[in-house]
Amino acid sequence: MGSDVAEFARRRLEPFGPAVDPEPEPVPASPPAIVLDLLRHLGLALSRGGDATERVRQILEQVAGVYAATGVTFFVVPTGVFVRVDTGGPSRMDFEAGTSDPLRLDQIDALYRLVDDIRHGSVDAESASTRLDALLTSRPRFGGVVSVLGSGVLTVGLGLMLNPRASALPVFLTIGFLVGGLRWWADRERMLSVVLPVVTATLVTATVFEWVAPALDAPPLEIVIPTLVTFLPGAALTVATVELSTGDMLAGSARLVYGLERLLVLTFGIALGVEIAGFPPPSGGSAASLGGWAPWAGVVVFGIGQFIASSAPRGTLGWLLVVLYVGYGVQALSGLVLGTLGASFLAATVVLPVCYAIQSRRSGPPVPVTFLPTFWLLVPGALGLQGVARIVGADQAAGLGDFISALLSIVAIAVGVVVGSGLSERIGRATSTWRGV
């Protein structure tokens, strides 16, 4: 039974990226060295775009077939690609090491447009390599100042989803600017990028616990949680769970360890911030929350902020908001009946076919552009960080329970992704080309 489930997942799994076209269109042969170089760099780019390793291998095999590269096999890990070429004599092995730094949404869009053009036989290997290099080195659509503003806006959106008091909104905006500024700086200083989660978590937590929460007479977690949600490794943990469920133990376990390490680093930063500032006195709780409209308004505010901060391609904001509202709506409404785990599973199951349906439209972006931002709504960020904060506080038992519940919800999302990919085939996405007709 278990092997049947794994085989179904391997055949139906399409969490990110365009569907595999079973009949690629060959193009005139290119020099083998150029083709192999393209395959290696393309594999790394797809991994950075959020694709599972099995999907990366499938796409590389198809690209190799388009360029008539025979006797080529691939072994893909999250940060590297092995290429083996069988020439009839001694085999040639090549390896390309990369980085785990994720691509921006505009880069992901350009990447899958390139893959689609290759499948259609409209670009040779030399031109494809040039386009790949150009998109990987391209600058963000928005400058540093605008991106920092976007970070503040998306933080306000996340805060609205927690339905806080009105006095907290300016604080969300200010701390969002701070986090965005630190991210912008970390993009230019490699050493800072390594310690960014712990530095940001420590700085934000200490500031909120020491000054902001007492000044607003508000619970500190109400302010800390939205500012740190985007540091949760939700995508890494979800893809790791999917890879493990399909039998890709090496890539899945490596990605799982990476995600847990990121989560532990964030935990350490929160604990250090609390230790520096100490717990504020209990808040009076006199101010009322904004009301039932706030979370629904928060979705559109978050979507606009994510569109700017993640440098989403032109014409995708409307599609992004559609997916965000579908994901949030299904999770919020079904959660009233099914609970957290059932709601996370159902939301992931529904969202993925919607992303593929949008991708099939001529104006629709590739699946990752609309699906990846939805992680910050599907992954129970508030629950996970609240559990982390409780662990370092007085209620350690409750915090551990929340922490485990958050991880189980990530598993539920991963299972929903597998089921949703099967539903995607039912609407015709798993067998059609990317642009649709």
Image (cartoon, grey):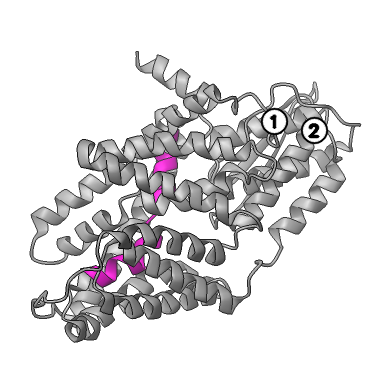
Q: Is the residue under label 1 in contact with that under label 2 (CB below 8 Å)? A: yes
Amino acid under label 2?
Answer: His
For marks 2 and 1, the one nearer the N-term is 2
The image shows residue 30 at horizontal and vertical percentages of 89, 36
Determine if the magenta segment contains residue 140. Answer: no
Say if 301 sits above or below 85 in the image: below
Circle 2 residues within 10 Å: few <14, some 14–19, many ≥20: some
Any part of residue 215 in sight = yes
Residue at 35% in and 41% down? 330
The image shows residue 95 at horizontal and vertical percentages of 66, 43
| Residue 157 found in image quarter | bottom left
The image shows residue 62 at horizontal and vertical percentages of 71, 29
223 horizontally vs 394: left or right:
right
The residue tagged 1 is 433
Q: CA distance from mark 2 to mark 1?
A: 9 Å
Q: Which residues are magenta?
A: 222-243
The residue tagged 2 is 120
